[in-house]
Image: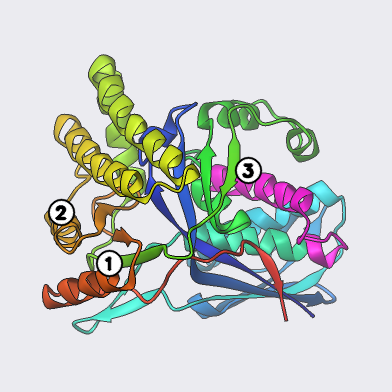
Amino acid sequence: MTSISAPGKLMLSGEWSILEPGNPALVMAISKRVYVEIEEAETIHVKLDDFGLEATGTLKNGTLTWNTTEQTTRDKLMFTKGAIETVTSYLGNDKPFRLRTWGDETVVEIDGEKRKVGFGSSAASVVAVVGAILQFHGHDISKRETKDLVYKLSLATHFKTQGKIGSGFDVAASTYGGIFEYQSNPTWLSAKLDSGQSVNELVTKQWEGFLVNELSISDTFHLLIGWTKESASTTTMVKQMKAYKAATPDAYTNAITTVAAAAKKAVTAMKNNNTKAFLAALQTNEDALRELGTVSGVNIETPELKQMSDLANAAGAAGKLSGAGGGDCGIGVCFDEETANKVRTSWKEHNIYVVDATLDRDGVRVDA
């Protein structure tokens, strides 16, 4: 049996502007992992512990057919199915296997109701499944060139399965780990997928506008993650932003350019190990995201996220939302333990849920 895992994601800087080619973002992996076990079997057998379901199927020429017609089950299996089909099509191998997946606890009970904390578990699961199948077929996922293959196969799967939206930063975080500068070109990838190119043709190409530049991390770096106790629909928000862009392209470009400029300053400051400039860039980034939400009408910085940011700033850290906004998580970043403790205490005093997670320096990996 082979065991593989992949971390979750958070964005440090560059939300929304990353959707436009050429704009950088600072991306990081966090210590909320998805795990996969894979072993030989007589037929395809998949068990998803987090959903309490399992299914069998038949794999032929890279197409997986489930032995169930239950639509809810099929819906919950769609990312796993996409990952299996993509990687086996690439390998040209229909060898059956048994696959089991589960994740670090990202479901929290609030007032008797279970709610999910958004750390990109669908992307992490796709990366872990793709990595597991490649490793099962003799590929060494500890090598950088194999990680690049995992990234391309996983991004093609995840991007297509979720309706061709997003930058793919969550897939990159789960693949490479640590903190890195990231750029993408969703328009290029969408066009390539629509063109009918085979998986093998696509992954052997140089991907236009995509960049992963891994950065060194100070040993004094502290990340605090707070949760608003509310989930957000990124898909809905992206559709709203696209409508704003189509209606007022000049205003959209101005607002996005301001966000991108803050992200570029954050990247430069991290490369230069300039902690003061880095924290200032994160605060500027939050201001720019707030303005983007105001002019676009998209609910990016909610009152809860603003409170989280303000409290982190008051404690001496840099606070901002992380991701699309509208709920989910905010972060506080600092470079000393005393300030980190102040942020934790302040958030808890204001009934903000402090998530037990931090930076994960590893990407997809083979586990003992």
The residue indicated by pointer 3 is 156
CB within 8 Å, label 2 to label 1: no
| CA gap, disc 3 and disc 1 | 31 Å
Q: State the residue in front, 6 or 158.
A: 6
What residue is rendered at 44% in x and 38% in y?
A: 268
Instruction: Give coordinates of residue 27: x percent, y percent.
Output: 47, 49
SS at circle 2? helix
Residue range corresponding to the magenta coloring: 134-162
Q: Is residue 327 magenta?
A: no
Relative image position of residue 315 (x, y in whole percent): 17, 64
Count residues near mark 1 (Cα–Cα under 10 Å), then give few for <14, some for 14-19, many for 20+.
many
The magenta stretch spans residue 153: yes
Q: Which residue is mark 2?
A: 306
In-image side of 342 versus 360 (left or right): left
Q: Which mark is residue 226?
A: 1
Amino acid on which disc 1 is placed = Gly
Coordinates of residue 256 in the picture (x, y in percent): 31, 28
Q: Quadrant of residue 189?
A: top right
Sequence-first disc among 3 and 2: 3
Task: State whether residue 62 appears in this view.
Answer: no
